[in-house]
Amino acid sequence: MDTAYEKLIQHLDGRDVRYQANDERGSICADFRCEVGTYRVIAMVDQDGSLFQVFGYAPMRVPVGARPAIAETIARANYGMRVGKFEMDLDDGELRFQASQILTGEDLEDEVIDRMMATTMTMLDLYLPAVLSVIYGNELPEDAIRFVESEGISDTESDSGMLHEED
């Protein structure tokens, strides 16, 4: 087992997080309830221990007819984002946020694990209302993103550090 993966397991155990481990893939899977939704989070260390990734999955699939509008929505959300990115599988409508950290020979630090997982859940909580308003409220992607960023980005900056470039 990789040292960084062992550190991830120790970190979660030390915080009494319930998770499922996949030692063969070097990954864990856990569900976290946040303000807007409950998110499935998969954290993994690649085979050679050089990359730590956290994927947070939205609790829904984007309907086929809404996928072009949601593709625009996440492109607008991603533009200027300094940490992580949103992704959507155009075939099945799966929507997720991904953050990653290159590991350079040092151990995977507790602060990195906390920051990456918190950032992933914070970004999902911030932008999921925009996605839902585009799908179910027929809001334009530009308006939905502008609204959530004007309402929530100042709180997100103080919680997770500056996540977007200044305009």
Image (tube, rainbow, N blue to C red):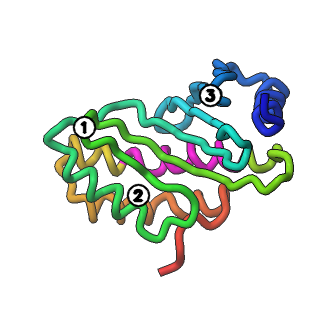
* Residue at the extreme front: 48
107 drawn magenta = no
Please provide percent x and percent y for residue 113.
Answer: 73, 43
Nearer to us of marks 2 and 3 is 3
Q: Pointer 3: what residue?
A: 25
Q: What amino acid is labelled 3 in the image?
A: Arg
Q: How far, Cα to Cα, is label 2 from label 3?
A: 35 Å
Q: How far, Cα to Cα, is label 3 from label 1?
A: 24 Å
Q: Pointer 2: what residue?
A: 148
Residue 30: image quadrant is top right
Q: Earlier in the sequence, mark 2 or mark 3?
A: 3
Q: Pointer 1: what residue?
A: 91
Which residue shows up at 71% across the image and 49% down it? Answer: 50
117 drawn magenta = yes
Q: Residues within 10 Å of mark 3 (few under 14, many from 20)?
A: few
Q: How far, Cα to Cα, is label 1 from label 2?
A: 27 Å
Please provide percent x and percent y for residue 87.
Answer: 40, 48
Q: Disc 2 on helix, strand or loop? A: helix
Q: Which residues are magenta?
A: 114-129
Q: Residues within 10 Å of mark 2 (few under 14, many from 20)?
A: some
Please provide percent x and percent y for residue 10.
Answer: 83, 29
Nearer to us of marks 1 and 2 is 1
Q: Disc 1 on helix, strand or loop? A: loop
Q: Earlier in the sequence, mark 3 or mark 1?
A: 3
Q: Quadrant of the N terminus?
A: top right
